[in-house]
Structures are given as structure tokens and as C-alpha cells.
Image (cartoon, grey):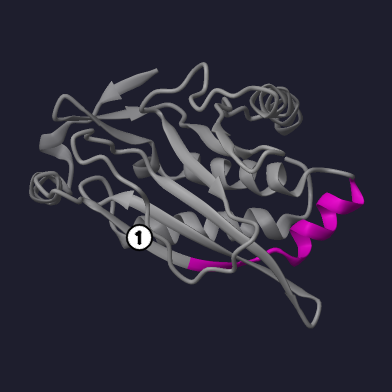
Amino acid sequence: MKKLLNMELWNRKEHFLFFKQFDEPFFGITVVIDCTVAYKHAKEHNMSFFLYYLYRALKAANTIENFRYRILDEQVFVYDYTHASPTINRANKTFGFAYFDFNIDEQLFIKNALMEIGRVQISNDLMPATSGENVIHFSALPWLNFSALSHARSFSHRDSAPKISFGKLTDSSNVKQMSVSIHVHHALMDAYHVAQFVEVFQNLMNEGKVG
């Protein structure tokens, strides 16, 4: 479900009108997330670390309203929830796009995600069966400890979905860290909102429990 944002009451109306005209309205920030507690908990409970951190990133994004904004027909809509469209690596060194519905129940989210991962890994299709604008585009680059990242973009397609990428898990003095790149549409949010997301995501990773 979605609702139209009342532009006249939005304190970012002028920012929206300014940045939506840009050929490239996305900006990106790369941060480092402490994964020590999260990784330990995931392994102790025989859980996929990828799905463990992906769920927490998606949950964090859903708590920040601006991450649920999308531009449709030059208007801003607020979705009740945003979902995940991650890249899934295959044994043949290619990947496919998947679609995971967000669910408050983490166990149900993981159960459904594992089924979708299995479907993508045995197919040759690139695109997921279900998608749309109401997603966050996630990707995992477990081979690279990057400090910055850019995305392939089609400027003829007026995309407004956030893009979050996860890097290689590194270990130094028993502290596990991972680079996270966050690209968002500047007409919909600012660095302040990205900082909110990072704070919530890090707190969820530090909890060390299944939500």
C-alpha cells in the first residue's frame, strides 16, 4: 500500500523540485559496519550471514520513512513497506536478480528468501518474477573490500529506488568489519537520512539476536 505525500506540507519540497531535475540525482556514501556480534550470532545459530545482515539492512531502511519514498509520475508516494531486490550469485559466476518481500517475522523472511535464492540459482533468468519500484536494490561483493562504489545507470529510466551494496567481510584483531555503500535519490533524502539508516542498521547488527 502507498499514499501520496502532501508536497505542500513537506519541508523538503524545494529540495525535491531542485534535485529531481538532475541527470544524475543519486549520491553515494560508503561506511564501515562492525559485524563482530552479528557474524558470531549468525554462525552460532547456523544462519546465512548474507540473509542475517540483509534482513537487518532492510528492516533498518523500513524504519526511515524517506527510504520508503518513491517518485511516480513526478509525485512522491510513501509506501507502507519497501522490499528487497538483491543480486544472487550463481555457481557459473553469473548472477540473477531476486525479489524478497519484507516481513516483520524474520524466520518467515528467511524461509521465503531461501526458496527464492534456490529458484534464482538454478535458472538462467536475469530478472525476478516480481519486482517494481517499491524495492531496495541490494548487491553483495564478497570478493572486494571497497572504499567507494558506483553503479551502472540508465538515465532514460527515472529510477528512485535506493541501492545498497555490501563488501568483503574483513577480520583484524578479532573485529569483523564490512564496507557498505548506500546510493540514494537526493530529491527524496539527504545525508542526514542515510546517517539515520546507518545508525539503526549498526544497532540491529549489534543486538546479536533473531528479531
Choose between 202 and 170: the one closer to the eye.
Answer: 170
Residue 133: x and y in percent read 36, 28
Q: Main SS of the magenta segment?
A: helix
Residue 101: x and y in percent read 57, 25
Choose between 59 and 145: the one closer to the eye.
Answer: 145
Q: Residue at 66% across / 49% down in the picture?
A: 53
Residue lying at the far front of the rendered structure: 92
Residue 181: x and y in percent read 47, 59
Magenta-tinted stretch: 31-45
Label 1, residues with CA under 10 Å away: few <14, some 14-19, many ≥20: some
Residue 40 is covered by the magenta coloring = yes
Residue 108: x and y in percent read 73, 25
Choose between 110 and 97: the one closer to the eye.
Answer: 97
What type is the residue that disc 1 sits on? Gly
Residue at which label 1 appears: 28
Q: Residue at 48% across / 25% down in the picture?
A: 127
Q: Secondary structure at mark 1?
A: strand
